Amino acid sequence: MSLAGKDLLGGPPPTLLPDEPGAALVAAGTDPAVVAAQHPTSSAAWAALADAAFARDAVVESYAYARTGYHRGLDSLRRAGWKGYGPVPWAHEANRGFLRALNALGRAAAAIGETEEADRIGQFLDDSDPTAKAALS
């Protein structure tokens, strides 16, 4: 529960990433490879590339794209004040690229047999926002 940016249960406030142009371009249908080349920090572009690769059964490629989006997202989260834990709400549109990349990384890790990583990523996604998995399925 939070009120005016303060968590009433003593945890950190939710991290809300700023809007980034890459997400809007991906949402508008621009080729995610073009977006990633123009906006390499866009988790949304890397997540879209990961999803497309996974859909065509290029699982290792999907894993690589998802890992890039995940790391770009971590960089953005840290710039936004995230300290390595705390909520990253799905309801905040600008957080969705990171959460999509995180989900894609867990899915690809599971597909290549990286069970421990898939479990850690699943927990990270739940810790970020317990509603995200349902929104992503």
Image (cartoon, helix red, strand yellow):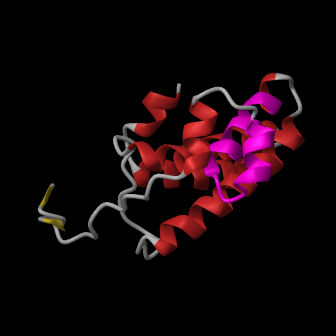
Above or below — where is 10 with respect to 97? below
Judged left or right of residue 7, residue 129 is: right
- Which range of residues does the magenta coloring cover? 32-53
* Pick the front one: 80 or 133: 80
- The residue depicted at 76 percent of the width and 32 percent of the height is 31
Q: Where residue 72 sits in the image (x, y, percent)?
A: 65, 62
The secondary structure that most of the magenta stretch takes on is helix
Residue 114 in view of the camera: no
In which quarter of the view is residue 13 placed? bottom left
* Pick the front one: 133 or 69: 69
- Marker count (numbered): 0
* Pick the front one: 55 or 42: 42
Residue 11 in view of the camera: yes
Q: Where residue 35 sits in the image (x, y, percent)?
A: 72, 44
- The residue depicted at 68 percent of the width and 43 percent of the height is 45
Q: Is residue 36 magenta?
A: yes
Q: Where residue 3 sits in the image (x, y, percent)?
A: 10, 60
Q: Is residue 105 magenta?
A: no
**Which quarter shows the N terminus?**
bottom left
Q: Where residue 81 sits in the image (x, y, percent)?
A: 40, 75
- The residue depicted at 42 percent of the width and 53 percent of the height is 128
- The residue depicted at 18 percent of the width and 65 percent of the height is 5
